[in-house]
Amino acid sequence: MLLLRFVLVLLLIGSGVCFAAYAFTSNPRYLRWGWMVLRVALVAALGFFGILFLERIL
């Protein structure tokens, strides 16, 4: 559980770094990478909260 939280935080930080790189360079490649990493982070968050929900039920 702790590992999943750590990965989720790293994904969110990576997404923020990509958006900051886009803000400084205006290179659309960083914007695409930022959105892609953010989508993966959201899927990981949904999985994390799904696991917490199932643990609570069972």
Image (cartoon, helix red, strand yellow):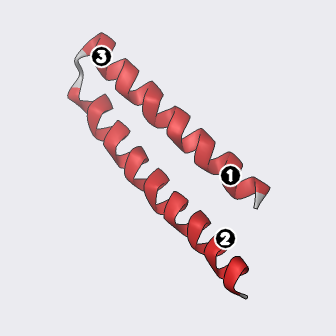
Mark 2 neighbour class, 10 Å CA radius: few under 14, some 14 to 19, many 20 or more: few
> Between residues 54 and 4, which one lies in front from this camera angle?
54
Q: Nearer the viewer, mark 1 or mark 2?
A: 2
**Which quadrant would the N terminus be assigned to in this image?**
bottom right
Separation of disc 1 and disc 2 at Cα?
Answer: 12 Å
Q: Earlier in the sequence, mark 3 or mark 1?
A: 1
Tell me which residue sits at (66%, 70%) in the image: 52
Could you say whether the residue bearing mark 2 is in a helix, strand or loop?
helix
The circle drawn on residue 36 is none
Q: Please name the residue that numbered disc 1 is placed on.
A: 5
Say whether residue 42 is left or right of residue 19: right
Quadrant location of residue 55?
bottom right
> Measured from the top left, where is residue 34 in percent x and y?
36, 37
Q: Which mark is residue 52?
A: 2
Residue 6 position, x and y percent, is 70, 47
Query: Farthest residue in the front direction?
Result: 57
Residue drawn at 27 percent across, 39 percent down: 32
- Count neighbours of disc 1 (C-alpha within 10 A) and say few if under 14, some if 14 to 19, many if 20 or more: few
Q: Amino acid at mark 3?
A: Ala
Question: Taking 55 as reference, is 46 left or right?
Answer: left
Residue 38 vertical position relative to residue 21 in the rendered view, above or below: below
In screen coordinates, is 18 left or right of 13?
left
Report the front residue among 6 and 30. 6
| Element under disc 3 | helix
